[in-house]
């Protein structure tokens, strides 16, 4: 332990406050004026708004309490290990805990960075058959060296500055990626907006759709082949059931209607369609761009589990330019897409490096 630091535990210095969830079927508990935070709201270091609001009755019924602005909340079940500073007064659900200092011997921002450092340790110690979680006693037992208040403030100031610079690097890469995506979408619209000489056809008459094969979690064996479901890649398997140039359409799920043009060996599940029997008058890449452009998701059933089908798309039109024009459009869009892909790879790399750098800095402080 560093000189002048004292051994402490979270439980020595903080009260851990549990959250709760009102009865979701009782309308008297919901749409009130009390913010109610869940893990889905914890998408940044500082929580400024919530997706749900509850009433005073809902707060009382849930046995929850309002955590004050400036306090720390941590996910102890769903989203295990996530930590946020509250920028608003908010109640919390049962998957979250508030971390409230008992006295002025520890800075809240120091606690925040400590939990950032311990996130992986917390995740690794989660228990549960389906959803991993930790108990309040586990959080209370987390130990660390506590420096004097003045040194805590110096550490917080240093980490604030270092993390801000790291976040700026990541933000610049994200901005470049988003600008490229916006340019691609604008070009997609400009190139695929129907023009004179393009032939209008009914989508379901231009090809047939065949569902993939069911692959349960029990039967999935980790291997080299991507598994495509309704929302894209869902995992990897040691067998494949499709190869070569293919167009996939997500059939089931919130993102159903998404389009994937693949060339590799994959396993496609029954939550996705394979586009078959495409006539030679279509360039396959052009067709995949065209299907992306018309946004098949808008034709999904409006149910808890959205689905698209031949029936739901029976009246959808698709426009076909001459084959030579299709090829020219593909060349332009492919060039732009390759730039987006490169920037995506760059952003992913920078994002990983930024996260790793933050953890290295935290280890330097807390270990």
Image (cartoon, rainbow, N blue to C red):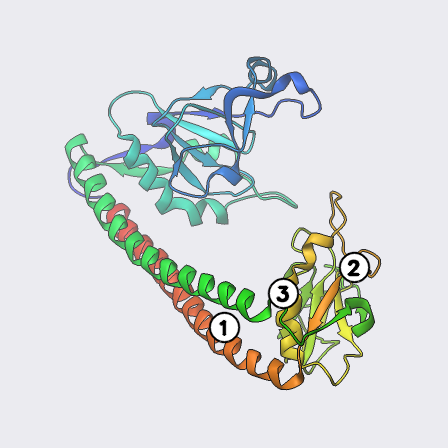
Name the residue rendered at 65%, 45% in the picture: 129
Give the vertical position of 17 relative to 43 (above or below). above
Which quarter of the figure has residue 308? bottom right
Please give the residue where the numbered disc 2 appears in the rendered image: 313
- Asked which secondary structure carries label 3, the reply is helix
Camera-nearest residue between 1 and 171: 171
Please indicate whether residue 116 sits to the left or right of residue 311 in the image: left
Tag 1 near tag 3, CB within 8 Å: no
Whichever of callouts 1 and 3 sits on the residue coming sooner in the sequence is 3
Name the residue rendered at 46%, 63% in the picture: 181
Whichever of callouts 2 and 3 sits on the residue coming sooner in the sequence is 3
* Observer able to see residue 225: no
Q: Residue 353, image x and y in percent? A: 35, 62
Camera-nearest residue between 48 and 236: 48
Q: CA distance from mark 1 to mark 3?
A: 13 Å
Please indicate whether residue 83 sits to the left or right of residue 38 in the image: left
- Asked which secondary structure carries label 1, the reply is helix
* Observer able to see residue 2: yes
> Label 3 crowding class (10 Å Cα cut-off): few <14, some 14-19, many 20+?
some
- Asked which secondary structure carries label 2, the reply is loop
Q: Which mark is residue 292?
A: 3
The N terminus, quarter of image: top left
Q: Residue 281, image x and y in percent? A: 73, 83
Q: Residue 270, image x and y in percent? A: 78, 63
Please give the residue where the numbered disc 1 appears in the rendered image: 337
């Amino acid at each position: 332990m560093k000189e002048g630091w004292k051994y402490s535990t979270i439980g020595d210095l903080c009260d851990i406050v549990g959250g709760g969830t009102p009865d979701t079927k009782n309308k008297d508990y919901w749409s009130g004026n009390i913010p109610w935070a869940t893990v889905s709201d914890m998408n940044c270091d500082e929580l400024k708004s919530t997706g749900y609001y509850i009433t005073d009755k809902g707060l009382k019924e849930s046995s929850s309490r309002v955590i004050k602005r400036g306090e720390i909340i941590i996910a102890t079940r769903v989203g295990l290990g996530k930590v946020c500073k509250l920028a608003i007064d908010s109640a919390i659900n049962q998957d979250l805990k508030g971390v409230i200092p008992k006295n002025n011997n520890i800075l809240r921002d120091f606690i925040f960075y400590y939990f950032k450092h311990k996130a992986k340790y917390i995740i690794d110690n989660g228990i549960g058959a389906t959803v991993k979680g930790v108990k309040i006693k586990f959080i209370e037992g987390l130990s660390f060296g506590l420096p004097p208040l003045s040194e805590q403030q110096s550490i917080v100031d240093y980490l604030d500055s270092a993390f801000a610079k790291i976040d700026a690097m990541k933000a610049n890469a994200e901005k470049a990626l988003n600008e490229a995506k916006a340019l691609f979408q604008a070009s997609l619209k400009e190139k695929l907006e129907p023009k004179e000489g393009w032939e209008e056809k009914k989508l379901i008459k231009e090809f047939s759709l065949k569902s993939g094969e069911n692959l349960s979690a029990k039967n999935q064996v980790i291997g080299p082949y991507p598994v495509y479901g309704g929302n894209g890649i869902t995992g990897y398997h040691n067998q494949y059931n499709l190869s070569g140039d293919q167009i996939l359409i997500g059939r089931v799920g919130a993102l159903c209607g998404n389009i994937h043009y693949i060339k590799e060996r994959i396993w496609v599940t029954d939550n996705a369609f394979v586009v078959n029997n495409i006539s030679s008058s279509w360039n396959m890449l052009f067709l995949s761009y065209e299907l992306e452009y018309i946004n098949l998701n808008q034709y999904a059933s409006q149910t808890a589990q959205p689905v698209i089908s031949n029936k739901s798309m029976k009246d959808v039109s698709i426009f076909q330019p001459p084959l030579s024009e299709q090829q020219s459009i593909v060349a332009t869009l492919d060039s732009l897409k390759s730039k987006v892909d490169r920037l995506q790879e760059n952003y992913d790399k920078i994002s990983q490096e930024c996260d790793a750098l933050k953890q290295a800095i935290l280890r330097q402080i807390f270990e």
